[in-house]
Image (spheres, rainbow, N blue to C red):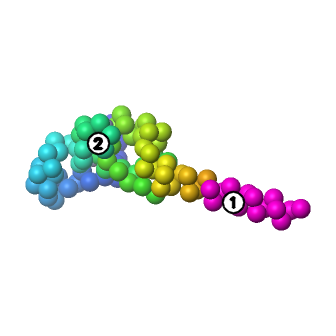
Amino acid sequence: MKVARNCYCNLWKKDPKALEDQGIPLGYCGICERCGKPGHVQHFPGPVPYTGTWCDHCVKIVPWTNITIWLKFIIPTLIISASIWYLFKFYQK
Ligand SMILES: [Zn+2]
Ligand SMILES: [Zn+2]
């Protein structure tokens, strides 16, 4: 069964040289940011607007290990939710 991916694999049809130049093997469209194995460009598997390149293995663990994502998206989200919650409590009194 083929999994439909929202990645750059169709670049192999349009511009295979661009992928070959980066040393990416056929069937993949990127190199995993985490382990350096061939992988695919894909959306971060979580509620943040981030796209990266991961292999099928790392994409499952990257939500817990990618510090950049925590710093850029999750911590600000937590701070904003905490402030909203605080304001909400404050006005309830
Ligand atoms: Zn990987
Ligand atoms: Zn791909």
Q: Which residues are magenta?
A: 79-93
Cα separation between marks 2 and 1: 36 Å
Residue 79 in the figure: left or right of residue 5: right
Nearer the observer: mark 2 or 1; the answer is: 1
Element marked by disc 2: loop
Q: Residues within 10 Å of mark 2 (few under 14, many from 20)?
A: many
Per the image, the residue denoted by label 1 is: 83
Q: Is mark 1 within 8 Å of ligand 1?
A: no
Instruction: Judge by depth and name the residue closer to the eye, 28 or 2.
Output: 28
- From this viewpoint, which residue is outermost toward the top? 57
Q: Quadrant of the N terminus?
A: top left
The amino acid at mark 1 is Ser
- From this viewpoint, which residue is outermost toward the bottom? 91
Residue 20 in the figure: left or right of residue 3: left
The residue drawn where x is 20% and y is 42% is: 27
Instruction: Judge by depth and name the residue closer to the eye, 72 or 32.
Output: 72
Check residue 87 for magenta coloring: yes
Per the image, the residue denoted by label 2 is: 32
Residue 21 pos. (x, y %) = 11, 51
Does the image show residue 16?
no
Residue 14 pos. (x, y %) = 16, 59
